[in-house]
Image (cartoon, helix red, strand yellow):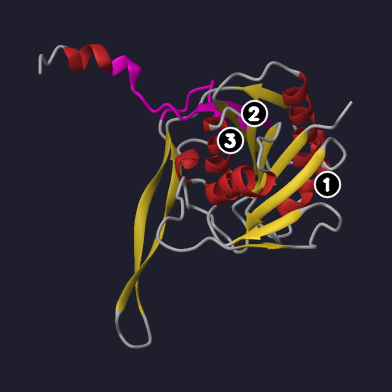
Amino acid sequence: MSKPLILVTNDDGITAPGLKALVEVVKKIGEVFVIAPDSPQSGMGHAITVNSPIRIDKSDVFGKIPTYTCSGTPVDCVKIGIFHVLKRKPDLVISGINHGSNAGSNVIYSGTMSAAVEGAIENIPSIGFSLDDFAHDANFLPAQHFARVIIQKALASDFPDSICLNVNIPNLPLEKLQGIKVCRQAMAFWEDRFDEREDPLGKKYYWLTGKFRDQEGAEDTDMAALKKGYVSVVPVQFDMTAHHAISRLNQWKM
């Protein structure tokens, strides 16, 4: 029986420790193909490159595993990986392991999750993994353990059509993690602030800062799961229609 073909990408770039950790997991599960940005692309969301060329180059960073760097965004990586390099759809698209949580509204801005959403658009089972730790030397071993469990389950089960999974792992030792909890996205947002600074020429510039806050504190969300030491799994869809608002808008009699 042939091994499943797994496309691996991320948004932290080809040299990110989280990508290396994820490749270590999947190389024992399937036939692996890696295409990742040649530089960090965090916060790119679902951006694609349309006004400049996209360049891809072979890389030996993962030894014998077919690997390419891409000058574009994480979504570009998935698109060009499927339609130009592989020339067929893989059995699974996985993205990560991201440095930092993508719970709550972070899913909108995340390049990691947008790569997974692009897989879902192509109706490919897709998963984005994030560790709630921004440190470059973060311990990815617990995340690897749960990534392995979830990937194997996804390959062996009936994966829902046109969705991807947003998986977030708390920054805890493996023995302190409580398990996996399927939940919904929290109403959690950034309270944006702009730090005004001045460059050596005296010209002002701005640096986006702020705090990420859970606005509801409900118990059935990804934020709550992470706080309680659970790995959160949120099914994500690219259909952004507010279905509940259709009947109300129809009352406008336009």
186 left or right of 155? left
Please state which amino acid type lies under the numbered disc 3.
Answer: Gly
Tell me, yes or no, if residue 243 can be seen here.
yes
Name the residue beneath numbered marker 2.
125
Q: Residue at x 58, y 38 (%)?
A: 116
Q: In which image quadrant can residue 58 be found?
A: bottom right
Name the residue beneath numbered marker 3.
119
Q: Look at the numbered disc 1 and give the secondary structure of its residue.
A: helix
Please state which amino acid type lies under the numbered disc 1.
Answer: Glu
Name the residue beneath numbered marker 1.
24
Labels 3 & 1 near each other (Cβ < 8 A): no
Residue furthest out toward the bottom: 201
Q: Residues within 10 Å of mark 2 (few under 14, many from 20)?
A: many
How far apart are the alpha carbons under marks 3 and 2? Answer: 7 Å
State the extent of the magenta-drawn residues as a range.
Answer: 216-245
Q: Residue at x 69, y 44 (%)?
A: 86
Q: Is residue 25 above or below residue 63?
A: above
Q: The N terminus lies in which quarter of the figure?
A: top right
162 vs 233, nearest the viewer: 162
